[in-house]
Image (cartoon, rainbow, N blue to C red):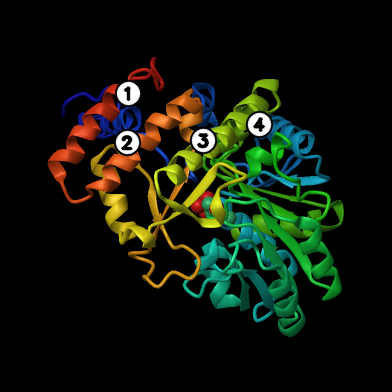
Amino acid sequence: MPSIDHNCPDPQLTDILRRELKRQRVKLEMIASENFVSEAVLRVGASVFTNKYAEGYPDNRYYGGCEHADELESLCQARIRKIFNCEHVNVQPHCGSSANMAAFFAVLNPGDPILGMSLAHGGHLTHGAPVNFSGRLYKTEFYGVREDNELIDYDELLAKAESHRPKLIIAGGSAYPRTIDFERFREIADRVKAYLMVDMAHFAGLVAAGLFPSPVPVADIVTTTTHKTLRGPRGGLILCRKSLAKAIDDQIFPGIQGGPLMHIVAAKAAALGEALEPEFIDYQRQIVKNAQRLATHLADSGFRLVSGGTDTHLILVDLRPKNLTGLAAERALDKAGVTANKNAVPFDRQNYAVTSGLRFGTAALTTRGFKERDMDQVAEFIVEALRRPDEDGYLTKIRQRVEAFTQAFPLYPNLDF
Ligand SMILES: *Cc1c(COP(=O)(O)O)cnc(C)c1O
């Protein structure tokens, strides 16, 4: 038996990890749902808490040895209550989808009617899509955006609420670049006596910084991921009023999860600690400035943007006027060193695997230190690549320039993998 070095993963694994680190360093990361956590969050997320079982909640666990886990989870909760000004938070959801599942289970029974934003118009799978548990368990109806301005159609929302009589209305989505009128959602929910849930997975960081209206005062339940604009580890959170606290907690554990990932709870606490620093507001402001600069540059270069621009970290480009599909554009950009994803645009005629749109986000590049003038360069790379999407040699040359450009923005300079 060869001796094993327990301080270092085996060479096969090390090689994969190193190549992934290199990929993150030399490409332009523009997937709107991604970000780069700090080295502190990375380290805490790989801590000895990965060894600990802590089923239950602070001071009420099913395992011994939880005294430090209790302190950790309480600290994480306190930071979240402070940032979002909420009455109660559950920090244990493994991801955004399980946060949503537990939230639904807390207020719905199978077969109940729900009303969410159409996936095709910027909603999320877990808001009732037929292929998702939410679409299989509940009677779903969808609202969307208006065709003329591509903003949420609140009249349609009201009409659908009155005809469908949902027990739960869901606001929020994954590809909607504009501010959302949560008060309006509340009025409509009240009119049909529905619960209102806001899924702020994408814009939670903006809410934390006060740059997007907070759904916390108006929604019954707010769910989120922690790894998008909030810049924490992969995971979820559920915020709610005291009156729903027990129902929510019971549905996370023992409802749908076993032991919480305490190393991830630790990393959430680390990220939320960063979010409490004044620099976090500057960071979030820069995200929006960068997105708006990118939007302006792309629009000036002849690209059509859904809703004409953005209020957030996110841009949706409609490629139909360019006779390009989202799939072809995503592939061309990847060859040019720009990582983004194809995305349906409202009223898209292409199927989900092809689409007519591209979604860009600026949270990750902003973490790397990109400012407005850097976004001009990024926009140029995108414009050039999409001008000749079928010419591999030409795209490779762009990728080499992208690689050189990224050198000025070191990512995890002290890290080996
Ligand atoms: C990303 C996202 C989720 C799901 O998050 P996962 O952690 O991938 O399960 C849920 N809702 C919305 C709106 C999202 O954007």
Q: Residues within 10 Å of mark 1 (few under 14, many from 20)?
A: some
* Residue 405: mark in rendering: 1
| Disc nearest the viewer among 3 and 4 | 3
Q: Which residue is mark 3?
A: 293
For residue 72, say whether it is visible: yes
N-term mark: 3 or 4: 4
Q: Is residue 376 left or right of residue 147?
A: left
> Are the residues at dot 2 and dot 1 in contact (C-beta closer than 8 Å)?
yes
Asked which secondary structure carries label 1, the reply is helix
Where in the figure is residue 266, as x and y percent of width and height? Answer: 60, 32
* Residue 381: mark in rendering: 2
For residue 370, say whether it is visible: no
Q: Quadrant of the N terminus?
A: top left
| Disc nearest the viewer among 2 and 4 | 2
**What is the C-alpha distance between the residues marked 4 and 1?**
31 Å
Instruction: Answer above or below: position of 253 versus 286.
Output: below
Which residue type does callout 1 highlight? Phe
Q: Nearer the viewer, residue 395 or 107?
A: 395
Asked which secondary structure carries label 3, the reply is helix
**What is the C-alpha distance between the residues marked 2 and 4?**
34 Å
Q: Is residue 159 left or right of residue 137?
A: right
Q: Nearer the viewer, residue 271 or 356?
A: 356
